[in-house]
Image: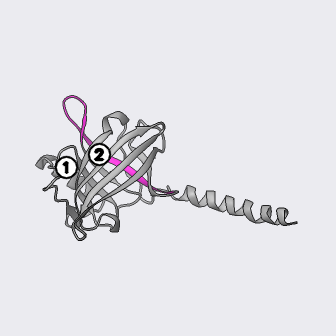
Amino acid sequence: MKKILNQVISIPLLGLSLLGLSACTIIDEPVDVVKPFARNQYLGTWYEIARLDHSFERNMSNVTAQYSIDGDKVVVINKGFKQDKQQWDKAEGKAYFIDGDNQGLLKVSFFGPFYGAYQIHDIVQNDQGRYTDSLVIGPNNDYAWILSRTPTLAPEIKQRFITKLKALSISEDKLIWVNQGDRQ
């Protein structure tokens, strides 16, 4: 009787859990993403140039994101200096391509089974085809990042990304321009 009761309770709970986990990657506000996308060109270190405010990066400077491949997963290591605590903070996450690695659409998780959309909306390439600057939008327009391979961004690229953000109803006034000064 106890075994049957456990099955009666656990099977629906498992179903609800799986339904809940699949809902975690729903994109509230889809944006156009980069297609074609070259996964290997995106790997490596990126400097966070600007972002919208959110609690998990509040008061951070010198923020970087490191992307590498481990099997079918993209390993994400974010690092930044917490100004208020005067210490470095690091978070390791994982990401997976949602519809194949030929488009800039991933789901990323830093918190267990919960995933958020990572939409690479625009990308800049150098003459050798290497990705140099990126505009990323989260699952909705409350999350946006401007990333670059260097701690600074060329003025024309900055304007290009600001124009794209405005088209998504994201005001430049809401951006936090990240201090990339004292790197350690």
| Applied colour scheme | one colour
Q: Is residue 22 above or below residue 43?
A: below
Q: Earlier in the sequence, mark 1 or mark 2?
A: 2
Q: Which residue is mark 2?
A: 122
Q: Is residue 80 above or below residue 38?
A: below
**Helix, strand or loop: magenta stretch:** strand
The residue at 43%/52% (across/down) is: 108
Q: Quadrant of residue 144?
A: bottom left
Q: Quadrant of residue 84?
A: bottom left
Mark drawn on residue 160: 1
Camera-nearest residue between 139 and 41: 41
Give the quarter of the figure containing the N terminus.
bottom right
Q: Position of residue 55 (x, y in %)?
A: 34, 68
Please check the rendered image and state whether residue 8 is part of the magenta-colored stretch, yes or no: no
Badge 2 amino acid: Asp
Q: Residues within 10 Å of mark 1 (few under 14, many from 20)?
A: few
Q: Residues within 10 Å of mark 2 (few under 14, many from 20)?
A: some
Q: Quadrant of residue 132?
A: top left
